[in-house]
Amino acid sequence: MSSLRGALWGLFAAAVALSAVMVALVVTSDHEDAKAAAAILGPFIGLSFAGTGVFAWLRRPHNRFGALMTGVGFAWFVAGLTEANDPFLFTVGAYLGPLYLVLVAHMLLAFPDGRLESTAQRVLVTVGYLTVLLVGLPFFLLGGRIDDPANAPDNAFAIVDQPDSAQVFMTLSQLIAGALIAWLVVLLVRKRQDASPPQRRAMAPVLALPEGDVGGMRLPLLRETRMPAVVAEIGPADLVVIHNEQLARAVVHALAAWVQEPIPAPSTTIPHRQVPSATRCATPCAKSG
């Protein structure tokens, strides 16, 4: 147990170091317009997932959910490499950036014990990882254009310059991703329908906190991977620290509810509504549509 504790503290220290790297990349980036927001929210999102995941992993070592949540945090930091001015780092971030979305889907399907329960769930998650790692790779090797926004580095993985052929693989990846999102919604609905009353209660928010206003927003923190953020008030800081394991479950429940009934994305903000309040947190979410 002591060796596991040391390893997990090492993981958290690595997450802190990566958050510092992300801040440095954002501040020195030649292609990030919203530097202040990206430098604050980007590391905060990654540390929120990594820190909560490490804590849950430490509390329940045999439950894989904490490991999955930690993985989401680290995948977010990898996607943050799209802030780099170096072409190789930028391309690595653009290539591996979508992995955090697959990990979020994996985490949702594996709640609460971190294990995928059905063949359909395992197939969906496997196809998701393969789509990012294999189907998307030819896009980069064939010289796909990733130099958007302005001043962004060029594709460092390009072997040949055939952007039209590369776009075929990008379109194929997008079509597969769309099908996987629809399939994910179906599986999440079935998962909730098949859950017992105690399991459904475990998915529900458990913090008894005062009510207050809260809003969400869609902010492209990392342009190339188009990672939106949802900002929410969840409760006083002291209670959040004490109840962060329950908070992690509440976050999963909220993400599952969003996937089942997504709110149409307006141009800037999502209307305010009443939810438990006070301390702000941010979580990545898949962009609908």
Image (tube, rainbow, N blue to C red):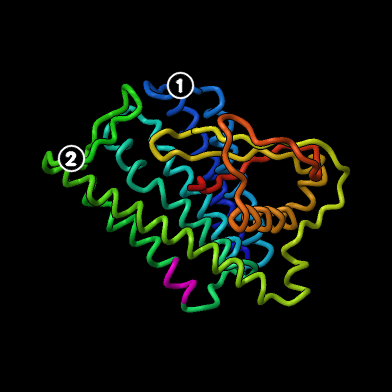
Few, some or many C-alpha atoms within 10 Å of disc 1 (few <14, some 14-19, many ≥20)?
A: few
Of residues 237 and 273, the one nearer the viewer is: 273
Percent across and percent down for residue 119 are: 47, 78
Magenta-colored segment: predominant secondary structure: helix
Q: Is residue 61 above or below residue 46?
A: below
Residue drawn 71% across and 55% down? 250
Percent across and percent down for residue 68 are: 54, 60
Q: Mark 2 highlights which residue?
A: 163
What's the magenta region? 120-124
Of residues 211 and 23, the one nearer the viewer is: 211
Q: Quadrant of the N terminus?
A: bottom right
The kind of residue tagged 1 is Asp
- Answer whether labels 2 and 1 touch (C-beta < 8 Å): no
Please give the count of numbered marks on the rendered protein.
2
Residue drawn 62% across and 40% down? 230
Q: Is residue 241 above or below residue 245?
A: above
Q: Earlier in the sequence, mark 2 or mark 1?
A: 1
Tell me: 164 left or right of 82: left
Q: Mark 1 highlights which residue?
A: 33
Which type of secondary structure does the marked residue at label 2 adopt?
A: helix
Of residues 178 and 42, the one nearer the viewer is: 178
Disc 2 versus disc 1: nearer the observer: 2
Residue drawn 46% across and 49% down? 75
The kind of residue tagged 2 is Pro
Tell me: 61 left or right of 208: left
Q: Is residue 123 above or below residue 89?
A: below
Residue 246 is inside the magenta segment: no
Percent across and percent down for residue 152 are: 32, 27
Answer yes or no: is residue 1 visible. yes
